[in-house]
Image (cartoon, grey):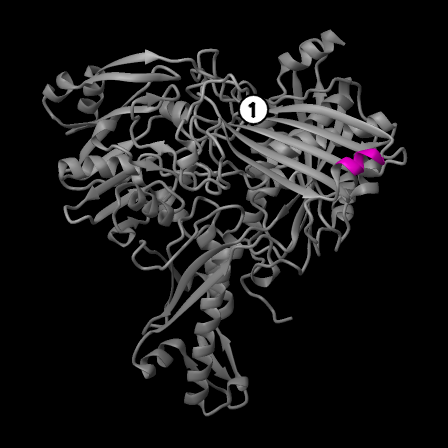
Amino acid sequence: MAERSVIGVPTPRVEGEQKVSGQAVYALDVTLPNMLWAKVLRSPLPHARIKKIDSIKALQLPGVRAVLTGEDIPGAKIGKKIIDMPILAQDVVRFIGEKVAAVTAESEEIASQAIDLIEVEYEEMAAVLDPLDAMQPAAPLLHREVTRYVGLPHPLEKPSNVMVHLSWKKGDIAAGFQQVDTVVENTFHASRVHQAYIEPHSCVVQAHGDGRADAWASTKNPFNLRDQLANAFGTSAEKLVVHPCYIGGDFGGKGDHNDAALCYALSLKTGRPVKFIMDYNEEFMAGNPRHPAVIRVRTGVKRSGTIVAQQIEFVFDSGAYASFRPQGFLVGAHDSAGPYRIPHVLIEEKYVYTNRVPCGYMRAPGHTQGFFATESQMDLIAKKLGMEPVAFRLKNVMRDGDVSPTGETIGHIRAEETLKRALRESGYSTAKPKNVGRGLAVAQWVSKGGESYVYVKIGEDGGVTLSSAVMDVGSGAYTVMRQFVAEELKVPLESVQVEALDTTKVVKDTGVRGSSSTRVHGSAAYEAAKMAREEIVLAAAKMLGASPKEVMLHDGAAIHAHAERRVTYAEIVRAKGAPIVAEGHYQNMKDGPEASMVAQVAEVEVDRETGEVKVRQITTSHNTGTIVNPLAHQGQIDGGVVMGMGQARMEEVAIDEGGKVTTANFGDYKIPTIQDIPLLKTVIEQSNTGSGPYHSMSIGETAIMPTAAAIANAVEDAVGVRIKSLPITAEKVFEALKSR
């Protein structure tokens, strides 16, 4: 294997200096000449008919330039996959926080004042706030036109609040349950969780009279934003230019583009650029949090501990709309049967409209809800059988080449090895004090696909420029891409400059999603660098009078070792008479074939008097591919664990009986602070089977998936009570202890 100078070396972020110095430009920072500010009036009711909107007083306020309602843009809807959300409510509001009217004014303050002057007359309608209630035949039908919505994963025979119903099958579930000795059935509840990024949604749009428009937005998928605008307003996508901006945090939440379509409509009406920034109260009441879920798990096992059949039913609360889901469903739910050999499996996913805040994607979408249920179930089955949770899992985990619960052959998974390392490094079997418990959970992530174009240019001075339209959400995509280019071209890392492109410069980019940055965007950069390298070698061989095989690259120059001659990249480009430009393209929309494996052990201490749970230590064991940047790699793991701990212990977007979000600020919505973070231990086994460049594999989402179940299992190990709903609060533990 050739010696690597950049791959595997801890590397600071390429944009780090710009960010800490304040030079990085976010959508929040964009200011255009003659720009107006927008504010929106939101519904105070969860379900109501709009009878009348009176905006005369708002229009009379000095500085106000326009007021827009749903009547001004009839039929205009947006959606990443399922197009069901009106830009402004049309006739009906379906959740508290839905946009009813919008104002543009010369300042943000004037726009806020004008919003308070708009009067709306509502006719209140029956609301349905529970997804199980919404599934009942007598429940109010929230979308009568749902059968006509574009983007549904499957056709609907008749209107229903269950707008998506998917099944994943292997074997014969009925026959499987007939073969078992014991059936264990439990129901689990996962809560609504916000991504809690620092930067709220923001955008600036300037529409031109001929259908063209320029947009700056806090979005990780500029091409999807462009397509949404084009579809909503019946214009050509090529006329809409989305300009690159830095993103102040994502975790899945910056893919919805929220209010860019509204700003486009306001800019069309006023002829001026329009800026909109959500405040954090709006983020909590009208953002796109993680889906809450009810998960029923039914498992059939032999007395020996062999799993024969497993049936999982997910009921996801979609909220009032489904527009924020890029696939129309959550990509991870059907993977959450786990890394186990199970011959008979049935997984059903139901997505249900309710009169609550619409939900979207968050780190490991569907996985965290599902693995909380199924890995809690594994401990409960082991307890029922009188087996140790470790022994039960080891008896059933997949080995390399086994068929997954949903029927895919996984060539690489290393489940047993990863699990045993977690046990060893955590001291799982060592003695522990009273009221201290240890819990285990495992999960697997099958790598995701996508499409990306990347350009590598070598200029007359020999400098290298890496260009891409990918928006770095904070995961370090450009840093990894830069490492690949530097490694292939054998140049110092600091000599590779980075350029973010707008949507006119690239054919397509699916954006950062599903731990795919290294595989998708990195592979495109790797291909571009290889092509540039080949051109350099051919040109240098000709100049040096050598064969290409005799040319080696080092420190920005091509060397003919035998003749002891060298020619720099700058000399090669000048001799060519034009820069060397290579286009790298990666397209693979399939998942897999390898799985990134994770096993976690949580150690907790429970106060029996109060129910308080203190997480003392979390040990995370990973089987992954080549680690490209150890600094960023560990950051992804630690961030995932802490985020998973927040979901497990404290985070919940709470909604009252009237449908109103009651955790509308970070005083009420709790996320982990430095005082909450326990000792974090990480052990990693690298392999050479990853489908990314240099055999790299996904890491961004694996660490979050088993955390909630590991903590729930540890709580039961500590004090003997099982909490089946997230978050695992002191109140729930106290009540369970008192009830027992």
* Residue 520 visible (yes or no): yes
| Residue 363 sits above or below residue 730 on the image | below
Magenta residues, dominant SS class:
helix
The amino acid beneath tag 1 is Ser
Q: Between 731 and 681, which is closer to the camera in this rendering? A: 731
State the residue at coordinates (46%, 48%): 512
Disc count in the image?
A: 1
x%, y% of residue 329? 52, 38
Residue 427 appears left or right of 490:
right
Start-end of magenta stretch: 174-179
Q: Residues within 10 Å of mark 1 (few under 14, many from 20)?
A: many
x%, y% of residue 657?
A: 48, 11
Does the magenta run of residues contain 12?
A: no
- In the depicted view, which residue is nearer to us: 694 or 691? 691
Q: Position of residue 205 (x, y in %)?
A: 24, 41
Q: Residue furthest right?
A: 304
- The residue that mark 1 highlights is 191
- The quarter of the picture where residue 681 lies is top right
* Percent x, y of residue 241: 27, 51
Q: Secondary structure at mark 1?
A: loop
Quarter occupied by the N terminus: bottom right
Residue located at (68% from left, 45% from top): 406
